[in-house]
Image (cartoon, rainbow, N blue to C red):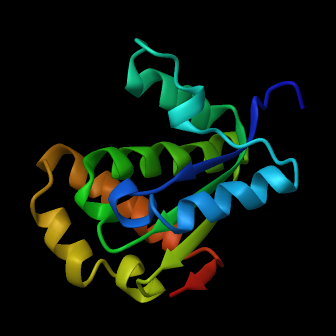
Amino acid sequence: SSTHEYEVFVSFRGADIRTGFKSHFFAALNHERIGAYRDDIDLPRGGEIGPELLKAIETSRIAVVVFSKNYATSDWCLDELVKIMECKRLLNQRVLPIFYDVSQSEVLEQNGIFAEALLKGPEDKVNNWRAALTEAADLAGLHLE
């Protein structure tokens, strides 16, 4: 469809997956000729990160959310997740969660490191983050260790 600039947008915490999983995942997508947004390639130099990433989310057919140990420690990852779940509801975007070395229940119920991270979040965002985590983790996804 002409409204989709990318087939896939991947939301991830770079510190957790940048060196291993990310390179293999993007190589597999590339091998299958699946166009994925890559901030290290597609983000215009000198452009504002926030609006460009939000546009990339909106113009992707599928969002893959890689929940990892430190995903919830990033305000930006959680803001991306809120936008992704909004696009699921409003634009019928498909969302595929991947639970990478974390359990689905840990994300769904916001236990452990997810609970700790949310305690440190700004009050005006935490409820939206909790709702987005619950909604995303309630979807059928992949479990990787």
Q: Is residue 85 left or right of residue 123?
A: right
Q: Quadrant of residue 143?
A: bottom right
In this rendering, does residue 41 appear at all? yes
Instruction: Give the camera-side residue of 137 and 41.
Output: 41
In this rendering, does residue 95 appear at all? no
User: Residue 97, image x and y in percent?
Assistant: 58, 69
Q: Is residue 34 left or right of residue 111?
A: right
Q: Is residue 51 above or below residue 85?
A: above
Question: Which residue: 77% across, 55% down?
Answer: 29
Q: Total label count?
A: 0
Question: Which residue: 49% across, 31% down?
Answer: 53
Instruction: Give the camera-side residue of 59 and 85.
Output: 59
Question: Which residue: 26% across, 48% down?
Answer: 75
User: Residue 49, image x and y in percent?
Assistant: 40, 25
Question: Which residue: 26% across, 73% down?
Answer: 114
Image quadrant in which the N terminus is located: top right
User: Residue 68, image x and y in percent?
Assistant: 40, 72
Q: Is residue 56 left or right of residue 73?
A: right
User: Residue 5, image x and y in percent?
Assistant: 75, 29
Q: Residue furthest top?
A: 46
Q: Is residue 131 above or below residue 36?
A: below
Instruction: Give the camera-side residue of 61 and 71.
Output: 71
Q: Quadrant of residue 116?
A: bottom left
